[in-house]
């Protein structure tokens, strides 16, 4: 009796469980495949990890449905009623539009200062992403924005060095062009040693730091400019899932019979048979399946097809010369794409406010949705007690209106630093930072045609612990140091392109290379957010990739059912 094809999916995240769900629901009536999902961790979900903190449902990983128009994640969430909950959840009322922007030194910035730079940044990013910008026949500021974007794009599309083709270089060239086109902007008074240009730069840097968390690029100079316009978003509002992102994962897994998903099964290597290589043959003589999966506990499993859904970070580590995740190593075209693409770390920090002890820090009623503007360069103007890892985060906000739980996002080396800090260190350093911003600003007085600053109405941060903002609890993600992920999500780095994302999705052996030989086709397939050209870095990109690889196998076996 002929053996059924065995498909092993590595990873029980969105891509892996979508593929498993599709393969099982499409063929369960005729029992076409022998299916397994092996997961190295002790839970399903991958980079989706719903948790609880301070009585609220929060997300340690994937958080948003990025546009509800046409999103398969939104469709599933609607079908399973995951958008309805009596329990409070992260961002249940969306993003606050009542932002309090504070510059270092305790100076609250009004909209007339913040809005022009915020609009400039948005227009520059819209331009980079190929979105329509505001009408150039509008206000003088709008003309400045469009002029800045066009001037900046000239520098990024011409031949140049490493930084010239990056989003970071484009943004900075846009800011320079904006300054050049609006030289006569009125200088500021009443903001201490902050000049108008220095504040503009610091506000702009605040938005750059937010963009770093959106993309996972620790430095926007490494984010490719030309590829930015290929990225696609769904239309409509962005929302969070009231019953948690994990509800989508649990729905996908719920159809699979017991034993299909195997937890705590960490793969150490994958042995396969490219053309002219028969390393598995002798070990596989009694099984006749071309792929041999080795696990860290010493066990093995043979398969006809393996769908690899591990993160790009794990693939980067696993394709290093000494790592040997694949035996024989992956072909050059595949390893080059893995190497060129970017993959960064983004972490979330949750802090719970103490119910008492915050009165003197201007948070009697509720903590504001705080945007933080720090001095952009290392100078004497910087507050010595604000740590470097906080200076490149943009905000600290309640997770919903009136919540006592605050959230801040970190990317790059700051995100990695956060992972190493104790709860006590985090509480002390965030408290110091917040109080330095929310305490009364220095009074400005004129003396001998210069500005001096007196502190008579400002209590020293160290002078009274009663006046500090107090936190009682901390929760943080640690995606960078988790060996199952080694980071958060992918981006197209300078030197890479969207074509590398397509290369990531190519199965092995390559289609067409097996037609006139005895080599088994489609031994190793690849899915995950880093394999989708236009929706990389998202859960719906991972979902689409899982469907793609499931459909690839269904078509290979001439299954003619529903391939949507």
Image (cartoon, rainbow, N blue to C red):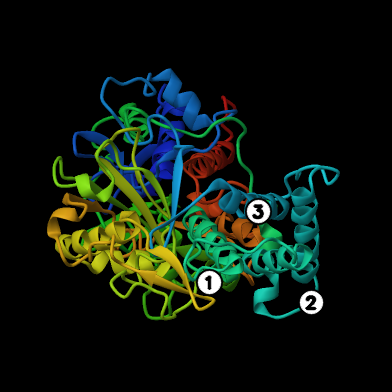
Q: Horizontal placement of 31 versus 86: left or right?
A: right
Rendered view: 416 above or below 58: below
Earlier in the chain: of badge 3 and badge 2, it is 3
Residue under the image location 48 percent in, 28 percent down: 74
> Which residue occupies 80% across, 58% down?
147
Please tell me which of labels 3 and 1 falls first in the chain: 3
Check disc 1 and report its element: helix, strand or loop: helix
Instruction: Classify 10 Å Cα crowding around label 3: few (below 14), some (14-19), many (20 and above).
Output: many
Image quadrant holding the N terminus, namely top left
Q: Is residue 223 above or below residue 473?
A: below
Between residues 92 and 251, which one lies in front from this camera angle? 92
Question: Do tag 2 and tag 1 residues touch (Cβ < 8 Å)?
Answer: no
- The vertical placement of 549 against 165, above or below, is above
Q: Quadrant of residue 13?
A: top left
- The residue where tag 2 is placed is 159
Query: Position of 113 compared to 284: left or right?
Result: right
Question: On the rendered image, what quadrant is the C terminus found in?
Answer: top right
Residue on which disc 3 sits: 125
Judged by depth in the image, the label closer to the viewer, 3 or 1, is 3
- Image point 37% across, 30% down: which residue? 92
């Amino acid at each position: 009796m002929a053996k059924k094809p065995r498909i092993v999916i590595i990873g029980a995240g969105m891509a892996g469980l979508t593929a498993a769900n599709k393969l099982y629901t499409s063929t369960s009536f005729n029992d076409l495949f022998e299916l397994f999902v092996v997961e190295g961790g002790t839970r399903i979900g991958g980079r989706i990890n719903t948790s609880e903190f301070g009585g609220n449902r929060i997300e340690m990983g994937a958080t948003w449905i990025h546009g509800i128009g046409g999103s398969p994640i939104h469709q599933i969430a609607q079908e399973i009623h995951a958008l309805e909950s009596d329990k409070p959840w992260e961002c249940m009322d969306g993003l606050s539009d009542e932002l309090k922007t504070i510059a270092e030194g305790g100076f609250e910035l009004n909209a007339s200062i913040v809005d022009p730079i915020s609009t400039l940044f948005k227009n520059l990013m819209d331009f980079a992403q190929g979105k329509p910008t505001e009408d150039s026949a509008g206000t003088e500021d709008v003309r400045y924005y469009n002029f800045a974007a066009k001037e900046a794009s000239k520098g990024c599309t011409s031949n140049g060095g490493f930084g010239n083709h990056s989003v970071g270089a484009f943004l900075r060239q846009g800011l320079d062009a904006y300054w050049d086109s609006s030289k006569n902007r009125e200088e500021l008074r009443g903001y201490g040693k902050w000049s108008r240009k220095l504040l503009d730069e610091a506000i702009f840097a605040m938005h750059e730091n937010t963009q770093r968390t959106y993309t996972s690029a620790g430095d926007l100079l490494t984010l490719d400019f030309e590829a930015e316009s290929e990225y696609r978003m769904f239309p409509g509002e962005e929302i969070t899932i009231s019953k948690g992102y994990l509800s989508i994962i649990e729905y996908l897994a719920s159809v699979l019979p017991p034993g299909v998903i195997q937890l705590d099964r960490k793969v150490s290597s994958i042995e396969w048979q490219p053309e002219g290589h028969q390393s598995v043959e002798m070990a596989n003589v009694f099984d006749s399946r071309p792929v041999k999966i080795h696990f860290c506990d010493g066990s093995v499993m043979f398969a006809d097809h393996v769908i690899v859904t591990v993160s790009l970070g794990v693939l980067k580590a696993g394709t290093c010369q000494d790592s040997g995740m694949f035996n024989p190593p992956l072909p050059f075209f595949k390893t080059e794409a893995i190497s060129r693409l970017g993959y960064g770390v983004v972490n979330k920090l949750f802090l719970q406010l103490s119910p008492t002890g915050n009165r003197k820090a201007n948070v009697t009623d509720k903590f504001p949705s705080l945007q933080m503007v720090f001095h952009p360069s290392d100078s004497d103007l910087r507050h010595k007690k604000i740590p470097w890892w906080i200076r490149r985060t943009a905000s600290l906000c309640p997770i919903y209106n009136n919540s006592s739980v605050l959230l801040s996002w970190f990317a790059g080396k700051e995100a990695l630093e956060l992972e190493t800090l104790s709860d006590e260190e985090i509480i002390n350093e965030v408290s110091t930072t917040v109080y330095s911003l929310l305490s009364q600003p220095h009074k400005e007085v004129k003396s001998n045609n210069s500005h001096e600053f007196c502190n008579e109405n400002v209590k020293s941060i160290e002078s009274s612990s009663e006046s500090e903002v107090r936190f009682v609890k901390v929760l943080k993600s640690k995606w960078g140091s988790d060996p199952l992920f080694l980071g958060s999500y992918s981006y197209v780095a300078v030197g890479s392109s969207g074509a590398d994302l397509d290369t990531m999705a190519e199965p092995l052996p390559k289609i067409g290379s097996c037609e006139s030989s005895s080599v088994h086709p489609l031994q190793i397939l690849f899915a995950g957010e880093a394999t989708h050209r236009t929706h990389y870095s998202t859960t719906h990109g991972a979902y689409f990739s899982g469907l793609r690889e499931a459909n690839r196998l269904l078509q290979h076996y001439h299954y003619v059912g529903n391939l949507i």
